[in-house]
Image (cartoon, rainbow, N blue to C red):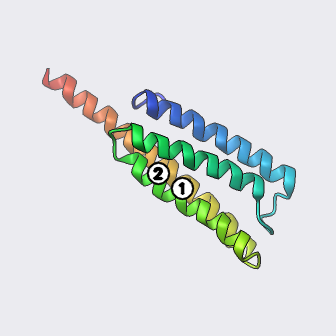
Amino acid sequence: MWRGDKLDRLTSVVLIVASIVSVAADNLVSGTFARPEIGVAVVDIVLLAYLLFVMKASTKFWPIWAVGFHTISVATHITVLIAPQFLSTPYAIYSEWWALSVVLALLAGSFESGSANKRAISRS
């Protein structure tokens, strides 16, 4: 959260808040991923809208990856809404895996940004 530009740091805070709200929504409804997790899906859709904003506002490459990964996470929710017989274990794993991928994209972009800043300073 201490690396990257202002938008990177804001996104890290948004991801933390989205994670906390997702856990609360998950525990409030069922917490088993045995049926569609509507609360978690709503949080993920709002987060996707935010990530789309970041992608359009940023000059970096990581938001494109983050949007791609998170779109798959949202698609997983849609799949479960369309086909409720989708097994709960893959549903939970896919949801969590793609969320982790978004965080890894942010970390990679933030560290790359920090490295680029150090190189620019050392050339001065």
Name the quadrant containing residue 33.
Answer: bottom right
Q: Residue at x 59, y 41 (%)?
A: 15
Residue extending furthest toward the top: 124
> Along the line of sight, which residue is nearer the eye, 98 or 81?
81
Q: Circles 2 and 1: CB distance less than 8 Å?
A: yes
Mark 2 is on which residue type? Ala
> What residue lies at 54% left-to-right and 56% top-to-bottom?
70
Q: Position of residue 38 (x, y in %)?
A: 76, 57
Image point (25%, 28%), residue name: 118
The image shows residue 88, relative to residue 38, as above or below, that is: below
**The C terminus sits in image quarter:** top left
Which residue corresponds to the image point at 55% horizontal and 53% vertical from the top-left? 100
Characterize the local packing of mark 1: few (<14), some (14-19) or many (20 or more) Cα atoms within 10 angstroms.
many
Give residue 72's quadrant in the image.
bottom right
Q: Which mark is residue 41?
A: none
- Residue kind at label 1, given as amino acid type: His
| Left or right of 29 on screen, residue 10 | left
- Residue 123, position as x, y percentages in the image: 13, 25
**In the image: residue 59, left or right of residue 91:** left
Q: Which residue is mark 2?
A: 66
The residue tagged with tag 2: helix, strand or loop? helix
Q: Which residue is mark 1?
A: 70
